Image (spheres, rainbow, N blue to C red):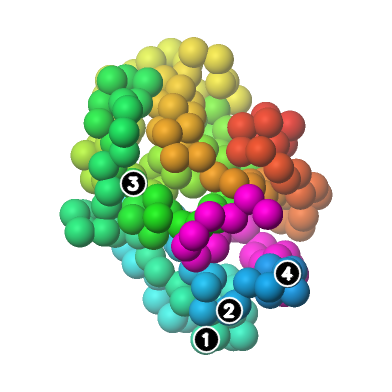
Amino acid sequence: KKRRNGPVVIVVSDITRPVPYKLFLPQLLDYLISEGVRKEEITILVATGMHRASTMDEKLFMFGEDIAINYRIIDHDAENEAGLVSIKGTSWSGSEVKLNRYYTEAGFRILTGLVEPHFMAGFSGGRKAVCPGLVSLDTIRMFHGYGFLSHPNASNGILEDNPLHLEACSIAGLCPSDFSINIVLDQNKQINSIISGEQFKSHEEAV
């Protein structure tokens, strides 16, 4: 009901994050199709940040053969200016923001991610799928730069006054997702909880 004109874009992590997509992504895709979304209207967007593009073997491992072969999967490229769009407004730090074109032009945006303690951003997941996952190289460099990382609150388990958290939240808020899926794992890397909904509230609950 909330969908605008444009494809449904599902933002996923790359191979460096142990998100068990095989356990929930097929059900999500089946649900979208059962609600009238055509397979060709769905894009799976890999939030690579500065990482390299995913290989076919990695896509097969992460998503399974059916999804890897039958769905459009695109890797974000932070250095491809043609694939980025300037967003109205500025980030928490006052910086201009460029985001992945597939994400900004989507008719419905779904974020997915793993929520666990993070040594810089306090906790992973949620807003980090957008920043640094889908931003330009300049934004990533600043996000991972000394000015942010040297702050005493840029540490494990701390969100309050953490510049990385504030920057990422502000950027994610400039082009909000329509739905967010937060995965919490147990000590055996199995799903403990899936907490979904509005991007900031659901992430806070997962934290």
Q: Which residues are magenta?
A: 1-30
Residue 14 part of the magenta-drawn span: yes
- Label 2 CA crowd tier, 10 Å (few <14, some 14–19, many 20+): some
Quarter of the rendering containing residue 83: bottom left
The quadrant the N terminus occupies is bottom right
Q: Sequence order check: which comes first, mark 1 or mark 2?
A: 2
Q: Secondary structure at mark 4?
A: loop
Asked if residue 16 lies in the magenta stretch, the reply is yes
Packing grade of label 3 (10 A; few <14, some 14-19, many >=20) is many
Upstream in the sequence, badge 3 or badge 2? 2
In primary-sequence order, the first of circles 3 and 4 is 4
Task: Judge whether 169 appears above or below 129 on screen.
Answer: above
Residue 81 screen position, x and y as percent: 19, 54
Marks 3/1: CA–CA distance: 26 Å
Mark 1 lies on a secondary structure that is helix
Q: Is residue 149 visible from the viewing direction of this image? A: no
Tell me if mark 1 has few (under 14), some (14-19) or many (20+) residues whose alpha carbon lies within 10 angstroms of its own: few
SS category of the residue bearing label 2: helix
- Give the Cα distance between marks 1 and 2: 12 Å
Are circles 3 and 2 on residues that touch, CB within 8 Å?
no
Question: Which of the marked residues, 4 or 1, is nearer the chain's N terminus?
Answer: 4
Kindly identify which residue carries mark 2. Answer: 39
* Nearer the camera: disc 3 or disc 1: 3
**Which label sits on residue 203?**
none
Q: Residue at x 28, y 20 (%)?
A: 94
Which of labels 3 and 2 is toward the front?
2
Figure check: 103 above or below 98: below
Quadrant housing the C terminus: top right
Q: Which residue is mark 3?
A: 99
For label 4, the residue is 35
Task: Measure the C-alpha gap from mark 2 to mark 4.
Answer: 11 Å
Residue receiving disc 1: 69
